[in-house]
Image: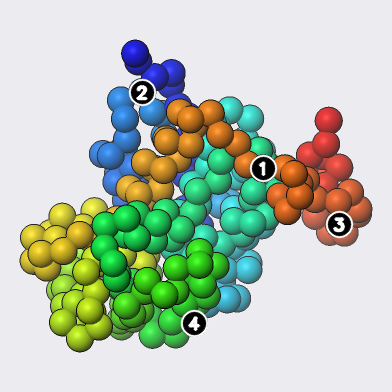
Amino acid sequence: MAQPTCHIKIINGNTCQPMTANINASAQAIKFLNTEIITVQPQTGPESIESFYDEYLAIPGILEQIILDTSSDAFILACWGDPGIEAAREITSKPVVGIAEASLYMANMLAAKWSVVTTLHRVRDMVEKTIQKTGLTARCASVRTTKLSVLDTEQDRTATLDILIKASQLAIQQDGAEAICLGCAGMSGLEKQLEARLGVPVIDAVAAAVKMAESLVHLGKSTSKHLTYRLPEQKEIKGYNPHFQAQSFYP
């Protein structure tokens, strides 16, 4: 029996238009025929997210894409650190899937040990904290950082592929990784070439999130509002537009 149409909004966490386009291309290539996807980026925020400062400034713009949405069945946060995911789950009952979380869950079903290969060396702590939140630290063989900036992954795909191959080979040979999670949305679309060179599963985080979001929608699941992800408490939030006020979320 044919499934009903599923509407998913993917939110690139940064304001880099070429990355938004690449994320959309990866998502469109993997989705079911009856899934409709739109990919957007915040109106405000950093061009790339490579620090806690970047991440915190990006979150209001990400949340706004959910607050003002009236038609999507699920949301995907397409930045590997899943910035603002807990707040996003508070303001909507629709499923909210983070690409980091999705990629780790998928790798966990394919390999006993896996590694995350990601961007700049400074993001190691951010990546490790993301893994800790999923409760999967014991299954992580390593976090391999590189000299790649987020924007590098879009601007020079050949160099990006070479660097990812080398870092992944180290993770496999030295750390015992049996699968690789690509730790940046800008790396989407490179997983097949990497698998051919590495001989282990390579997880495109955007693709993983699309399939998980589709599954949650088709299963008819919604975000629990029992306790932790209840609507925010109603209080004044000074300096923010009316749609950010918690009372606007209530009937």
Relative side of 131 to 92, left or right: left
Q: Earlier in the sequence, mark 3 or mark 4?
A: 4
- Asked which secondary structure carries label 3, the reply is loop
Q: Nearer the viewer, residue 161 or 152?
A: 161
- Asked which secondary structure carries label 2, the reply is loop
User: Can you give x and y, in whole percent of width and height, for residue 231 in the image?
Assistant: 78, 45
Query: In which image quadrant can residue 199 be found?
Result: bottom left
Query: In which image quadrant can residue 122 be found?
Result: bottom left
Q: Which residue is mark 1?
A: 224
User: Can you give x and y, in whole percent of width and height, for residue 197 in the image?
Assistant: 8, 66
Q: Earlier in the sequence, mark 2 or mark 1?
A: 2
The alpha-carbon separation of the residues under discs 4 and 2 comes to: 39 Å
* Residue type highlighted by circle 2: Asn
- Taking the view exactly as shown, the residue that stands out farthest to the top is 1
Mark 3, Cα crowd under 10 Å, few <14 / some 14-19 / many 20+, is few
Q: At 15% across and 55% down in the image, what residue appears? A: 192
* Residue type highlighted by circle 3: Ile
Q: Which residue is mark 3?
A: 237
Q: Earlier in the sequence, mark 4 or mark 2?
A: 2
The alpha-carbon separation of the residues under discs 2 and 3 comes to: 40 Å
Q: Which residue is mark 2?
A: 34
